[in-house]
Amino acid sequence: MTLLDAREGEEYIIKDIATEDEELEAFLFSLGCYSGEPITVISHLRGGCVVSSRMEDIIWILI
């Protein structure tokens, strides 16, 4: 499942961050987005989505 498949308002547990971009992975980690952490999709947008992490920050993720 990817963020595009997730339902808005439901909490999910991150299984994996599938990227070869180490900078992106480090950035997401600094925002609390890493394996084992909960994440909630707030809304889907064209080409991405808005999520909330355990840190209760709103994060825009473009896919």
Image (spheres, rainbow, N blue to C red):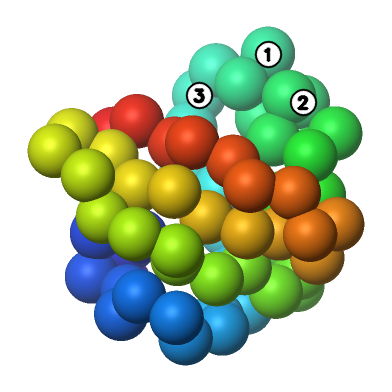
Q: CA distance from mark 2 to mark 3?
A: 11 Å
Label 3: which secondary element = loop
In the rendered image, residue 61, in percent from the top left (x then y), is placed at 44, 36
Q: Residue at x 35, y 75 (%)?
A: 8
Q: Residue at x 85, y 34 (%)?
A: 30
Q: Quadrant of the N terminus?
A: bottom left
Q: Which residue position holds label 1?
A: 23
Horizontal side of 61 relative to 57 (left or right) equals left
The residue under label 3 is which amino acid type? Glu
Asked whether the viewer can see residue 60, the reply is yes
Please tell me the numbered disc located at residue 26.
2
Horizontal side of 41 relative to 24 (left or right) equals left
Horizontal side of 53 relative to 5 (left or right) equals right
Judge depth for marks 2 and 3 and give the one in front. 2
Viewer-proximal residue, 48 or 25? 48
Q: Which residue position holds label 3?
A: 20
Judge depth for marks 3 and 1 and give the one in front. 1
Quick check: marks 1 and 2 in contact, CB under 8 Å?
Answer: yes
Crowd class of label 3 (few under 14; some 14 to 19; many from 20; radius 10 Å):
few
In the rendered image, residue 63, in percent from the top left (x then y), is placed at 28, 34
Label 2: which secondary element = helix
Horizontal side of 50 relative to 40 (left or right) equals left
The residue under label 2 is which amino acid type? Ala
Q: CA distance from mark 3 to mark 1?
A: 9 Å
Image vertical order of residue 7 relative to residue 26, above or below: below
Q: Residue at x 34, y 30 (%)?
A: 62
The residue under label 1 is which amino acid type? Glu
In the rendered image, residue 37, in percent from the top left (x then y), is placed at 76, 69
